[in-house]
Every structure is written in structure tokens, then in C-alpha cells.
Image: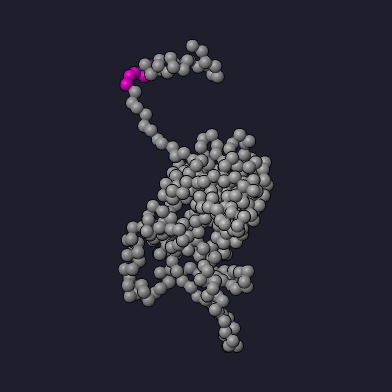
Amino acid sequence: MKAYHKLKACLRTGAATIPNKRIRSSGNPGGANHGNIKKYFIDAGPESSIVEGDDGMKRMYIRSLVTDNKILLERDPGYIKRLEGVGDEALIAAWLKGDWNAFVGQYFTNWDAKKIAVPSFEIPDHWPLFGGMDYGEAAPTSYGLYTVDYDSNVYRLCEYYQGNATASQHARAIAQMIESCPFTGGRYPQATYADPSMFVKRRLSEVINHSPADVFADHGIFLTRANNDRVTGWRIVNDALIKERFYCFNGWNDALMRTMPTLPRSTKNPEDLDTTAEDHAADELRYAISKIYAPHRVTEPEPYEGTGQEMIDQLATQTGRRNGRYAYA
């Protein structure tokens, strides 16, 4: 959206006969900037309503469908049938219905916000806490606080998501978030898995030579190098989504909930994300979940060769017979 906002600065005139200065844009759902466009235009307010931004400029989203183009349909009446015949439901919804919730090229097709967002609850003291972090200074730093229950379900409790800040500013803000988390009693995570680049030391002067990880350690947040195998990490994330073992506390994870469903697949490597998209929260999730989630393997039971009574006798021998809560031989 930087190019679009820069274009607004060129919207000027000294002519008194042009009272209203406008930019008219058009586009289809999909692509690396899908999420930002959807957030700025489509989700900003009700369809065909005027929304005023912080800069004083007003904007409006007007849905434009192929059925509005009467001349096209008169001259090419078979066009809609050809659109319906592409065979991709997301593509049909995007091109034919103008549906911005249908994302062509979406990477996380198993992302279901209705299932992932759950009500918050107090975390038991015996549940471990973990952190994940993707680091940026001009770009956003994303930090997520996680826990895992005894069924191996992963919960993302809350997040920090902020750009244009130094390592020390990020560290102070994240420490404050951890200490004030209402679900954990302010407990610090056992480990925070972070981007390996955070451990590269920078020579600031003859006597100062430290890394962003050193700065975080000074604020009580000790980092562990994460596995940066992107493709394997995304497979683990997708496994957790498919098996419905990943959840977010509703209302506390806005950046992840906003960006994850809008991330596109890379055109160069279909197994990876498009790294030009807003993938900071996704990367942080990948660092954390690669360490704290173990994909479950489904094994088929071996067929039992014997009678039903023989099976009962064998089980009774192995475990003892049971009467309610009490076992007896």
C-alpha cells in the first residue's frame, strides 16, 4: 500500500473549478497485497459507505460485478459460463462474485477463524509457557505467548506486534506484556524461539559489540535459536490446523488472525509463502510451533486373530478385572 499512499500525495490542483480530488482504483481479490487492500477498503466499513481516514481523506468500496457490464454480456454472452468453468471455487467466487473472503492462491487453506478463535481462560500453573518471535525494527516485530495442554493442543494467548522500534523498545514492551498477561499470572515463558538472525552481533563501536538477542537478555527475555527450515515449518503449522490442535484466544491475537488467512503461496516455490506478503506473525508462529507441537501419527491397529472371548480373557489377564473405580484379580 506504500505506492498507493504515495500517490495520494500527488493528488493536488490549484484550479477552483475542481473542488473534489479523487483516486479511482479497481482490482480483483488475490495477490501478495490482498490482505492490506481488504483491510483498507473492504473491511473499513459497510459496502458503499464513506469512511474517513486519519489523513482526512474519504474512501469507499463499491462492489463491481461482471453482471454490471451489460455491453460485455451482450457482445459475449458466454463469458459467465467460461468463468464458471475454470473449476476453482475460490477463483469463481473472486472473479464472478467479487468475494474478498475467497482468496485465490491462499497458502493456509485450512485456516478456519471460527474454529481457531476460542474464549480465553486462566492457564493452570503446571501448563508450560513458550514464546515465539520474528524480529524487525522498521518492519514489525511479532511476539506470541503460547501454552500446550496435555492433549498437545497449542494455544496462542496474546501477542505483541509493532514496527518502527529499536530492540530495547521491543524488549521493554514485550516484557510488560508478559508480566501483565491476565491468563498466566505474569509468568515468563520457559523458552522463546526466535529468528536465528537475532543472534548476529553488530559492532556498534570499539567497545560495544552485541546482538538483538543480547538486548532482550538484558531485559530478562532469553532467546533460543529457532529452526529456520521454512517448508518443514509450514508443514507442521498445516498439520496442527488440519488436526484442529491450534487455537488463539479471541480478541488477543488480532495481527495473526488478520494476516494468516491472507498469505499467498509463492509463485517460485509452491511449498513456501510469498515472502513479500505480511508474514511476520506467521513466521513467529512457525518458529514456536515447530518446537512445541509434535504432529500426530495415525496408526492402523493390527487385526486380532482369535475369538471375542479370547480377547476378553487376554485383557483381563493384562489389566486385572475392574469393578467401578477398583481393580481386583
In the rendering, at what x and y percent does residue 232 appear? 42, 46
In the rendering, at what x and y percent does residue 252 appear? 60, 50
In the rendering, at what x and y percent does residue 228 appear? 46, 49
Q: Which residue reaches farthest top? A: 329
Look at 51% across and 35% down and name the residue there.
Answer: 151
Q: Which residue reaches farthest front? A: 206
The quarter of the displayed image where residue 205 is located? bottom right
In the rendering, at what x and y percent does residue 253 appear? 58, 51
Above or below, 196 relative to 299: below
Above or below, 127 relative to 319: below
The residue nearer to you, when weighing 2 against 96, is 2
Above or below, 244 relative to 57: above
The quarter of the displayed image where residue 105 is located? bottom left
The residue nearer to you, when weighing 9 against 192, is 192
> Is residue 39 within the magenta segment?
no
Residue 238 visible in the current orientation: no
The quarter of the displayed image where residue 316 is located? top left
The residue nearer to you, when weighing 286 against 45, is 286
Look at 43% across and 72% down and name the residue there.
Answer: 68
Count the marks: how many? 0
Residue 128 visible in the current orientation: yes
What's the magenta bit mostly, secondary-structure-wise? loop
**Which segment is the magenta one?**
305-309
The residue nearer to you, when weighing 48 against 289, is 289
Q: How is the image coloured?
A: one colour
Look at 63% across and 69% down and name the residue there.
Answer: 54
Look at 67% across and 49% down and name the residue there.
Answer: 176
